[in-house]
Amino acid sequence: MLEGDFRRPSIPLYLNVNLEEGLVDILSSKSDFQSTMVPVANTLVPFADDNLAVLPAVHRTQSSTSLLSSPRMRDLFDVLREQYDFILIDSPPILPLSDMNIFEEVVDGIVMIVRAESTSRDTIAKALNTLGTDKVLGIVLNDVRQAPFSSYRYNYKYDYKPDTN
């Protein structure tokens, strides 16, 4: 998994490791990416497996567009595609930034994450229009408030009359 949000990196908050370098450093040619990969087994992710790895951004930068569109990013993707069956990218929001346009060039598919009662239908429509629909695999709706079970009612009536013939 790659952390693609360079302006507000958050994945390091969930990892149980101290990292000094990350994807921003790799793309800035400051680090070798093999030494920066973090096995998920060494993190707080409960379903950890030795075959999973996380590459967090670690450092913030406002020059994400230049780093993401760099030849070094394409080279990194080429190497990662050889080593991993799937590469997930945690990207920044689609609309206010141009980063997703860059990711769209290197990914096979996009899954949008939409927050219930926060993201408007208009915003979703604009995001889908911006992306086009050829790579959108689906939408995940999160933070859905579930009604308490006690207020759930189900009325069902069944009448059975035996045939008297």
Image (cartoon, grey):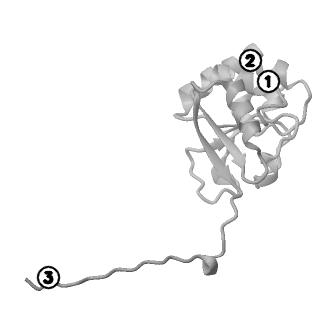
Q: Position of residue 78 (x, y in %)?
A: 61, 20
Q: Is residue 146 above or below residue 57?
A: below
Foreground of the two, 133 or 66: 133
Helix, strand or loop status at disc 3 = loop
Q: Earlier in the sequence, mark 1 or mark 3?
A: 1
**Which residue ends up furthest to the left in the rendered image?**
165
Neighbourhood count class around disc 3 (C-alpha, 10 Å): few under 14, some 14–19, many 20 upward: few
**Which residue ends up furthest to the front in the rendered image?**
165
Number of the label disc, if any, that sits on residue 27 = 1
Quadrant where the N terminus lies?
A: top right
Helix, strand or loop status at disc 1 = helix
Tell me if residue 28 can be seen: no
Residue at image mark 3: 163
| Whole-number angstrom distance, CA of label 1 to CA of label 3 | 78 Å
Number of the label disc, if any, that sits on residue 72 = 2
Neighbourhood count class around disc 1 (C-alpha, 10 Å): few under 14, some 14–19, many 20 upward: many
Quarter of the view holding residue 134: top right
Foreground of the two, 157 or 4: 157
